[in-house]
Image: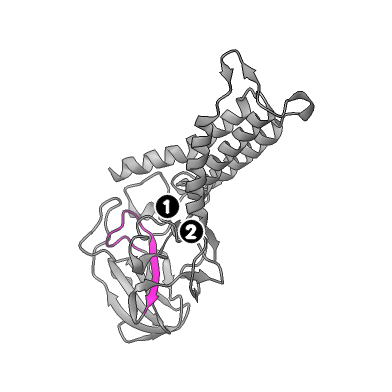
Amino acid sequence: MFLTLIIILTFLTVAVPLLATAWLWKGKYKSRIDWLLRVFVSTAVVVFFLLAGTWVFLSIWLKYIVKALFVFAAIKKFPRLEDRKIFGKRDSKGKVSYNGRIAVLVIFLALGFLVIKGRFFKGETIDLSFPLKGGRFLVIQGGASPITNIFHNSDPSQKFALDIVKLNAVGNRANGFFPEELSRYKAFGEVVYSPCSGVIAGVADGLTDNKPREVDKKNPAGNHIVIDCGDARILLAHLMNGSITVKAGQFVKGSQVIARVGNSGNTAEPHLHIQAWKIDKADEAIPLTFGGEFLVMNSTFRN
């Protein structure tokens, strides 16, 4: 079921923007208004999928190709003003109706608004050092939007949580669409560094790393580490079995090696989960920034 959902979402991520681009490119415009409405609708569709699409399951570079194709189509098909009327023509069947296009435009404007709104937040952040090094990384879930952070947003303590994967040369997080071997996922086994200086508040280890798509719902965080950094408590979850190098009560420095990325707990594939909340208010999530940057879904970070 999970794999089927990912396949459908990935297909839509690529197919829908390309269809919107083709619709703009092949359109026979009756007026400048006709052209403008097509541009607005197709732009809303393409922007939504560029920001919230599951590109990482194929290649993040695909979205730049789609963006370039769309911009080319929009510019190439710009109607010359002298060849078009400002207002829509009437045809033999009567007045031109744009109701369908307006409905699609409203839907994708609303979806786009939710995605963009998730890039903003209220309250103070905690600025951390990025916990992974040596490559290009991507946020597969993150931000303050229920669309781009669907599995975390409903939990007050996880509202700003991030799921991070590592990318290979072709912009995928694994060598294959959804390989069966953990070793084929770029994040698996990556060294995890402490994102701050603080005291280890808790450690859990000894849980077996799941096979891809097999989750352990009884132990959601899997092997994990909790660090008290000032007034904030940081959780790093889904760590590799037997890789944790720190103990509860131990003081750690920022960028100190503390574990490796695994696939333990409620996770379908290797990635690093990180979140923060106030020590005295476990249900109050704190937005995370890295070098002052607030990361969201499809944000990339090279460290």
- Check disc 1 and report the residue beneath it: 147
Q: CA distance from mark 2 to mark 1?
A: 8 Å
Identity, as a three-letter code, of the amino acid under mark 1: Ile
Farthest residue in the front direction? 94
Farthest residue in the right direction? 82
x, y percent for residue 157: 35, 69
Asked if the residue under mark 1 is in contact with the one under mark 2, i.e. CB atoms within 8 Å, the reply is: yes
Q: Which residue: 48% across, 35% down?
A: 15
Q: Which residue: 76% across, 24% down?
A: 83
In the figure, 66 relative to 260: above or below?
A: above
x, y percent for residue 162: 42, 63
x, y percent for residue 98: 55, 29
Residue 168 shows up from this direction: no
- Check disc 2 and report the residue beneath it: 118
Name the image quarter holding residue 77: top right
Identity, as a three-letter code, of the amino acid under mark 2: Gly
The residue nearer to you, when weighing 178 against 16, is: 16
Q: In this image, 245 relative to 91: left or right?
A: left
In the figure, 112 relative to 295: above or below?
A: above
Q: Which residue: 44% across, 54% down?
A: 148
The span shown in magenta is 262-278
Question: Is residue 269 magenta-colored?
Answer: yes
Residue 185 shows up from this direction: yes
